[in-house]
Image (cartoon, helix red, strand yellow):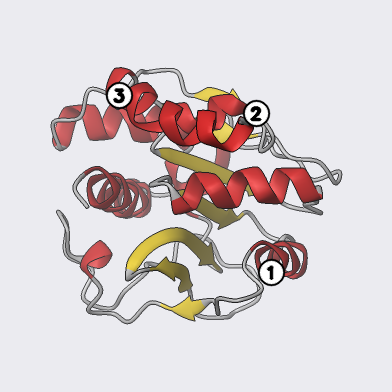
Amino acid sequence: MRYLFLIFFIPLSWQVSAQEIAVMQYQGGGDWYVNPTSLPNLIAFCNENINTTLNPEPEVVKPDSPNLYRYPFIHLTGHGNVVFSDYERQNLRTYLESGGFLHIDDNYGMDEYIRREINLLFPDIDLQELPKDHEIFHSVYEFPNGLPKIHEHDGRPPQAFGIFIDQRLVLLYTYETDLGNGWEDQSIHNDPEEVRLKALKMGANIIYYIFNN
């Protein structure tokens, strides 16, 4: 009965809260709460530029919560370890299979942990690198070279990886770019305005893509 309830709950909830997005609070010791100004700034940019009506303050949601199904877009970031329990993986996978979307942005130091969890979450589906001509790089703003580089860490190129279910992108993992730092208040990282704008435009592309696919 629990899973029947969740499947019934999803469309009704999203119809009510279609313009809500959330940040994921996870276990493992990683700083899920990092970049507190990033999502509010991205929301403000999207509301001003791509005609969204997102709630100015993003919610916080845990992977085992039934509230997961309220949000068509969930953002996960941090620097360290990420651990999902078996039930959290089951709930998160059901959410993604039912129309949800998870954006994971490595804030630096998360890669080995999040790849492990993605493999446990989708042992039957390979994580694929998105080609430069994928729609997410061209939905509103043009990024002909694919994912932009925002912060330098190890000198590696930025990469965008995805999990697809029935040809639908359900999970986006952005690596070696640090979009979230670019979304933060300028005073925090002292990024030039053109770098921040590039990060915000890429974020707007992601939001637009999710709300229109």
Q: Mark 1 or mark 2: which comes first in sequence?
A: 2
Q: Mark 3 or mark 1: which comes first in sequence?
A: 3
Front tag of 1 and 2: 2
Q: Amino acid at mark 1?
A: Arg
Q: Mark 3 or mark 2: which comes first in sequence?
A: 3
Q: CA distance from mark 1 to mark 2?
A: 22 Å
Residue 65 has which mark?
A: 2
Residue 54 has which mark?
A: 3
Q: CA distance from mark 3 to mark 1?
A: 30 Å
Vertical placement of residue 188 versus 19, above or below: below
Residue in the picture at 75% in, 68% down: 116
Is the residue under label 2 in contact with that under label 3 (CB below 8 Å)? no
Q: CA distance from mark 3 to mark 2?
A: 21 Å
Residue, disc 1: 115
Q: Secondary structure under badge 1?
A: helix
Q: Is residue 14 left or right of residue 106?
A: left
- In this rendering, does residue 68 appear at all? yes
Q: Amino acid at mark 2?
A: Ser
Residue 38 has which mark?
A: none
x and y percentages locating residue 73 in the rendered image? 41, 40
x and y percentages locating residue 204 in the rendered image? 27, 46
